[in-house]
Image (cartoon, helix red, strand yellow):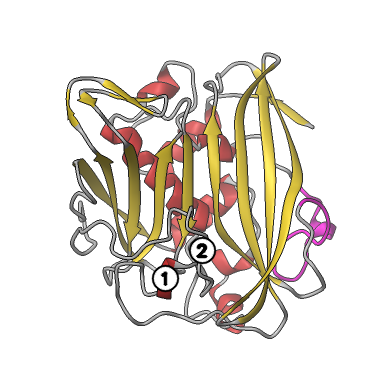
Amino acid sequence: MTAELIGPEPAEALAGLLDIDVPQPVRDGALPPLWHWVYLLVRRRQSDLGEDGHPVHGVPEPPGPGWRRMFAGGRVTAYRPIRIGRVAARGSEVAGVAEKSGRSGPLTFVTVRTRIEQDGALAVVDEQDIVYRPPGSHLPVPTTSDGAGGVPGGGVLGVVPNSGDPGGGAGGAGGGGAGPGGGGAGGGGLGGGFGFEVDPAVLFRFSALTYNAHRIHYDREFAVREGYPDLVVHGPLQALLMAEALRRRGVDMLGGTFSYRLLVPVFGAQWLAVTASVAGASAGGASVAGASVGGVSDVSVAGAEVRDAGGRVTARSTLSG
């Protein structure tokens, strides 16, 4: 287990990266959804890192030397807020390994489950799906635009997801191109969104805040050598943006499970359109599987998505029980 005092500084730094004021939950002494990603970090020794900047041992451990790692998606269930000013502890384990085949060749999916506790009680269960590709394989870069972000069947890295995956289904929320403030409301019900500009400085700062030394995010020469056209935008950053869209929509995620899937990679500096939607909404006040939505009742599900500057859906998420 890794334990530390939860201070306000990492949250304040993340707010700065997102170019927003410190949000009300932080001022009230609690972390917003997914903001625990800048806390309780595993800080590896420099000698533990491989050429790509990732640890070569630990949880998870690559299947073999030179295997390339990408972030595929995950699920976060928040049982109680993580409070600032108190000690929290985390422990991680490999929850599952699956072998699949994609357009880029054989893939190994590893699910890492992290539990965060505070004051003797479970606060968060965070599952992350990591995909490894063998040395020499190259990730296909989509050039088409469809409702699933250019990936047949709405899959990630060319793998068709299970029917329960949030990325599984064609279509998806409509919402215009990306740009300052870009992106309309997604799906049915009430919605809202915002634009977010990613550039090398954002990618570097997010890498630093999350203690992520993977060079594809800040070393363009290395990224190109690995077969990418430009720097790779972090998958967790897109997930965090979707959670932010729901938070700004008034959705409280406590008691619900936030499931997200990265559909296609995003490369280089560009504006992203982030949209949130609440399906089955009407005036009143109720909850989404235990997660409340201010001023909205009869809610069946909430979700969000990210579109790149070309209009492709690059990430999609749902909040449900």
Position of 47 compared to 90: left or right?
right
Most foreground residue, 36 or 253 = 253
* 51 is within the stretch colored magenta: yes
Mark carried by residue 161: 2
For label 1, the residue is: 153
Inspect the image, locate mark 1, and give the three-letter code of the amino acid beneath it: Gly
3D distance between C-alphas at marks 2 and 1: 8 Å
Residue at (25, 41) in percent of width and height? 279
Q: Which of marks 2 and 1 is nearer the N terminus?
A: 1
User: Against 14, is 152 above or below?
Assistant: below
The label shown at residue 295 is none
The structure residue drawn at horizontal position 48% and vertical position 52%, both measured from the top left corner, is 164
Q: Which residue lies furthest to the front in this view?
A: 163
Q: Can residue 208 be seen in this view?
A: yes
Q: Do the numbered discs 2 and 1 sit on residues whose CB atoms are within 8 Å?
A: yes
Q: Main secondary structure of the magenta part?
A: loop
Q: Work out which quarter of the rendered image holds the N terminus and state it.
A: top right
Residue 218 spot, x, y in % from top left: 55, 65
Q: Answer whether residue 284 is magenta in the image.
A: no
- Quarter of the image holding residue 122? top right
Question: Residue flagged by tag 2: what amino acid is it?
Answer: Pro
Q: Magenta segment range?
A: 44-59
Considering the numbered disc 2 on the image, is that residue within a helix, a strand or a loop? loop
